[in-house]
């Protein structure tokens, strides 16, 4: 499980940081909150993120992708929140006796916080990309299934309509269909489809 901050009054401080950075209703709000809680907890424990925690950060990125939060927005929020947390660490860690007593320890803590933040952001980006890639592949497969069933003419109409809705296809409006055949085997269909899409947009 994620470490929870041990410093007294830290929850209110973290909430204030999030409130100052993330707009009300922003779907990234609770993700940023969990990120900050984890960074603070690791700083108090004086240890880097474990593999379990890195995997949890990947999960946060995946959740953000599922909520249609752009990865650029998420990374910007995480970077800004880390920068906002840094000058508040003395007030957050000192009451629990966890703030460094020497300059050397403070430097070590700084390295730990920023290294952990970088690892966390990388994991969040990886999780976000993974979910996005899976969604694109799923949409492509659904699109292929829809076209196959549509052209075959044997699929149940209700099933076709449901499948059309899933891929954003509206059967009630006019559409044009283009059928392609390859003159030889080994044709790069993806390249051919991209060229066709470009031509149709012009």
Image: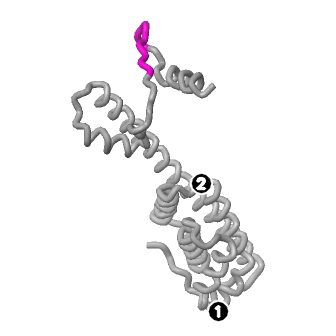
Quick one: quadrant of the N terminus? bottom left
Which residues are drawn in magenta? 178-186
Say whether disc 2 or disc 1 marks the residue closer to the N-terminus. 2
Does the segment drawn in magenta span residue 182? yes
Disc 1 crowd rating (10 Å Cα; few below 14, some 14-19, many 20+) is: some
Tag 2 secondary structure: helix
Say how the picture is coloured: one colour
Q: Residue at x 65, y 77 (%)?
A: 19
Indicate left or right for 50 with 99 as reference.
Answer: left
Dominant secondary-structure state across the stretch colored magenta = loop
Query: x, y percentage for residue 101?
Result: 72, 85
Q: Is residue 194 visible?
A: yes
Q: Residue at x 50, y 54 (%)?
A: 127
Which residue ends up furthest to the top in the rendered image?
Answer: 183
Indicate left or right for 149 with 122 as reference.
Answer: left
Answer with the quarter of the image where residue 111 lies. bottom right
Please state which of the two labelled residues, at mark 2 or mark 1, is closer to the viewer: 2
Q: Residue at x 59, y 54 (%)?
A: 70
Q: Residue at x 63, y 64 (%)?
A: 117
Query: x, y percentage for residue 46?
Result: 60, 76
Answer with the quarter of the image where residue 7 lies. bottom right
Query: x, y percentage for residue 177?
Result: 43, 24
Query: x, y percentage for residue 181?
Result: 41, 13
Tag 1 secondary structure: helix
Task: Answer above or below: position of 168 versus 106.
Answer: above
* Residue annotated with mark 2: 71
Foreground of the two, 46 or 28: 28
* Residue annotated with mark 1: 95
Indicate left or right for 191 with 161 as reference.
Answer: right
């Amino acid at each position: 499980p994620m470490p929870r901050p041990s410093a007294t009054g830290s929850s209110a401080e973290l909430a204030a940081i999030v409130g100052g950075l993330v707009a009300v209703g922003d779907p990234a709000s609770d993700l940023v909150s969990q990120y900050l809680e984890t960074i603070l907890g690791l700083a108090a424990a004086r240890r880097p993120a474990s593999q379990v925690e890195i995997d949890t950060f990947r999960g946060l990125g995946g959740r953000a992708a599922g909520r249609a939060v752009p990865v650029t927005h998420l990374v910007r929020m995480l970077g800004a929140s880390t920068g906002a947390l840094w000058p508040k660490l003395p007030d957050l860690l000192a009451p629990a006796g966890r703030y460094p007593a020497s300059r050397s320890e403070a430097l070590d803590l700084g390295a730990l916080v920023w290294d952990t933040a970088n690892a966390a952001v990388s994991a969040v980006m990886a999780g976000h990309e993974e979910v996005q890639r899976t969604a694109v592949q799923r949409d492509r497969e659904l699109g292929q299934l829809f076209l196959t069933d549509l052209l075959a003419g044997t699929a149940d109409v209700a099933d076709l309509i449901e499948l059309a809705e899933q891929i954003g296809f509206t059967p009630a409006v006019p559409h044009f269909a283009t059928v392609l055949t390859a003159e030889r085997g080994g044709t790069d269909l993806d390249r051919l489809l991209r060229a066709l899409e470009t031509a149709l947009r012009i």
